[in-house]
Amino acid sequence: MMGMLVSLLALFLLCPAMAGAAGELQPLSITMEGYEYPYPVSFLPLTIEGQDLRMAYMDVPPEGRSNGRAVVLLHGKNFSGNYWKDTIRVLTQSGFRVVVPDQLGFGKSSKPNIHYSFHLLAATTRKLLDTLGIRQVAVVGHSMGGMLATRFTLMYPEAVTHLVLENPIGLEDYRAIVPYLSLEDAYRGELNATEESIRAYHRNYYTAWKPEYDEYVMIAARWRLSGEYPRLAMSSALTYQMIYEQPVCHEFANIRAKTLLVIGQADRTVVGKARVNKELLPQVGQYPLLGRKTAGLIPGAMLVEVPNVGHIPHLEAKERFHRELLEFLKQ
């Protein structure tokens, strides 16, 4: 009996989701010390606005024979590089080297109070690739990562062989849709988040909830228990401001890289949706229409529409997403 109790206690401590079910969440450091990523994590030192910072990243070599090509995966706002684990595996098994950064303000990277911009994040991503000796890369961006991937491609067209946008946010200009929110109010909103509100928000990403998705809810919920959480809340508010104030949708016509859009057709994401006028809601966040419009703006862009899938095809429709991704990267 004593052995069984010890085993159950060990399982409880190792499983954040079970801890959440029991109402006894353990705090998680805002830079996720002790939280295992699917592959080894390294750090790029950076100095920005007088602050010494670290940018976390995974650099995963191909399994078996290399095809000599590299892919960088750019995460969304409410995620970090760990949610790409299945995509990393599929790409490395196909001979690609895969680089997965946690952008500043996210995941295992530093959480500074700085002026966040897509230009800055693109420049630090380029510095990482230069440090790793990667001159050309296929860029895959999901959600906020799609806005960053767009900016990166516009800033460094010579470095981008392929651009893949997976349900990117910013396909419309939120400044014309969403009422302005001050930095202070955005910060207070982050501080007031609860496990229940975080889970409700994440449920909107999918057409059908699966227990495996709870991992990403629990990361955010456990962060709230950290003594450093206010610092993370401020960096999150600052990156919200970045998204709102720095649209990329007006520049899609300037992209020259081979481009693929993968759009889950059930997605209705609008950043700041809770503040949108109710009469306007049926007209915004319409990803089927936004995907077709964007594909028409980017010269030669290909569009894959994934029915009955929400905001994260690489989690909700893994096989379809990976099949389309590999087929496109072969071109």
Image (cartoon, rainbow, N blue to C red):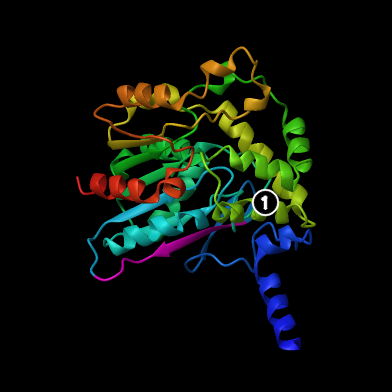
Which residue does the image show at 39% across and 37% down from the upper left? 155
Of 221 and 50, the residue lying toward us: 221
From the top left corner, tell me how far across and down residue 51 is, in percent: 65, 52
In the image, residue 87 sits, relative to residue 18, either above or below, namely: above
In the image, residue 82 sits, relative to residue 299, either above or below, namely: below
Query: In the drawing, does residue 245 fall left or right of residue 255?
Result: right
Figure quadrant of the C terminus: top left
From the top left corner, tell me how far across and down residue 192 is, in percent: 79, 40
**Res. 97 visible in picture:** no
Query: In the drawing, does residue 155 fall left or right of residue 213?
Result: left
Amino acid type assigned to the residue bearing label 1 in the image: Ala
Q: Would you name the residue on which mark 1 appears?
A: 220
Of 122 and 171, the residue lying toward us: 171
Q: Residues within 10 Å of mark 1 (few under 14, many from 20)?
A: some
Residues shaded magenta = 53-64
Which residue does the image show at 74% across and 81% down from the upper left? 5
The secondary structure type at the circle numbered 1 is helix
Which residue does the image show at 69% across and 63% down from the upper left? 18
